[in-house]
Image: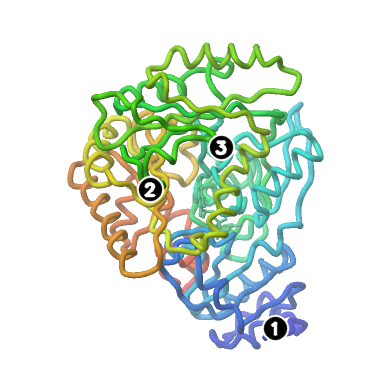
Amino acid sequence: MILACLGRIVQDTDACSIPDDDVSTISQSLDLQGTIESGGIQGVADKDFGGIYSVKPLALVKPSGTEDIARVVKAASRTSHLTVAARGNGHSINGQAMADGGLVIDMRSTEESHFKLLRIGGSSYIDVSGGALWEDVLKRCVSMFRLAPRSWTDYLGLTVGGTLSNAGVSGQAFRYGPQTSNVTELEVVTGKGEILVCSENQNSELFFGALGGLGQFCIITRARVKLQPAPDMVRWIRVVYSEFEEFARDAEFLVTRGEGESFDYVEGFVFSNSDDPINGWPSVPLDPDHEFNPAQIPQTAGSVLYCLEVALHYHHSDHTSTVDSAVIGLLERLGFARRLRFQVNVSYMEFLLRVKRVEEHARANGIWDSSHPWLNIFVSKSSIVDFDRTVFRNMLKDGVGGPMLIYPLLHSKWDDRTSVVLPEGEIFYIVALLRCVPKGPSVEKLVAQNHEIVQWCNKEGLDFKLYLPHYQSKEDWKRHFGNQWSRFVERKFSFDPMAILAPGQKIFKRSNINRN
Ligand code: FAD
């Protein structure tokens, strides 16, 4: 049922009590340009990529723009306990974009609100909607301007606001930092329903709070993203190691070298030393014509192997010999198993959209809608060897039914003023266990195994932080934020004092007292 939303606007000062569960009263108070729906929304607002949690919202709002979003938040603030969750593309794992009995805002309906190229001080930027998908930002920037954002996620079917609320990490982050280090201005709606523009110099606490802020302080409606000239082509290479120490040494060597002295993209993954089609050798080659010859695996290899994945940008105008010599110059310094090297040349767009091909394949096989009990962790360099020994080589030696990513990042490329929390030290690794399993009892076992890994990290005193964190208790959140907790709480009090926003993160409880 679509509820007509052409009712009278309730005055802002009219802090009357709207019954919390009465959608028609709420909708009448909104005067939305967009729509609000309370029926037929199952499978959208109560579902996410994780496929583990499901809670029923009161209604799904499809705003037409920022003003609509502000009206929704203000209306919620006039009730005693309504919450509001911005839903990007619902690609969270643990219900982070859901609102139990609250209002879910479908940010995708605002994706066309902003798209404008700017030149500021000789640099290029694009203003995009918080609800835009990164894949659309890529396609439009490249086709219209031959420009592209500098820092990505592996998969681009994610929204700008959704990844900026976490960090946004991929193989370019070692050079440019996460996506949160590549935006200079945001337009947001705070938990008080105010529409504000913020940047390093304007409302800076709100700006840095929003970046990596898990949606706790505001809803991002527009972001100004740094651009660079887009290359035409990418040489995409995978090389294999039997020893973790050598893999890590080479990966760290590449991420600590300057531009022009390294690849443009550096990632890595662990795979099982077996012929398992998903978890083993067949997961490495980049082309169906490439063959992984197990006879080339060093004799010393154990239960798992390591793949370093790198890429070099180039232009159509570059001679093949120039690209070849740049690649050879870099690879000859690395200690991989010489005959276990795979490479292809693909267009820049094909490279950045590589996980889209995986998605298409998974959808065709009916497994995209499986459960995904993923675990993402940042582990410091000082703890990564222990982590490899116990978790990869032992607990997960047979794989997780999907990629097990591991690659180094540099703390100095992140801004400590944002809300993201990281382990200590300059070099830390992102570890991503991208599990894919049919829905059923095995999901619970895998969630339990994720807990076991985190418990083990805690018990052994590893220096780590969860990425895309998920905790149930305030104590765990406090531990997660550590000495940043009081700053996080102060930001909450300042920008969302009634704890209306992003209830699915389960950090703060909705209050009906405005603590400001
Ligand atoms: P949602 O899941 O819809 O929302 C996430 C959180 O942000 C929720 O709390 C929500 O309320 C809040 N939110 C959403 N939009 C806004 C907004 N506009 N303003 C404020 N808060 C908002 N992450 C990486 O860093 N690197 C990767 O390579 C990567 N690859 C991925 C691949 C796949 C297949 C999937 C499913 C996820 C991947 N992720 C990756 C994780 C991704 O960054 C998170 O899922 C993130 O939440 C973005 O998803 P979304 O846009 O669907 O946001």
Q: Secondary structure at mark 1?
A: strand
Q: Does residue 197 appear anywhere in the picture? A: no
Name the mark nearer the viewer: 3 or 1: 1
Which numbered disc, 2 or 3, marks the residue that appears first in the sequence? 3
Q: Would you name the residue on which mark 3 appears?
A: 181
Q: Position of residue 283 (x, y in %)?
A: 44, 41
Q: Callout 2: few (<14), some (14-19), or many (20+) C-alpha neighbours within 10 Å?
A: many
Disc 2 Cβ-to-ligand 1 distance below 8 Å = no
Q: Is 252 on the left or on the right of 106, as rendered?
A: left
Q: Would you name the residue on which mark 1 appears?
A: 2
User: Identity of the amino acid at label 1?
Assistant: Ile
Quadrant in the picture for the N terminus: bottom right
The residue at the point 63 percent across, 25 percent down is: 313
Q: Is 385 on the left or on the right of 1, as rendered?
A: left
User: Identity of the amino acid at label 2?
Assistant: Leu
Q: Residue furthest right?
A: 144
Q: Secondary structure at mark 3?
A: helix
The residue at the point 37 percent across, 21 percent down is: 337
User: Identity of the amino acid at label 3?
Assistant: Ser
* Image height of 272 relative to 469, above or below: above
Q: Would you name the residue on which mark 2 appears?
A: 433
For marks 2 and 1, give the CA distance: 40 Å
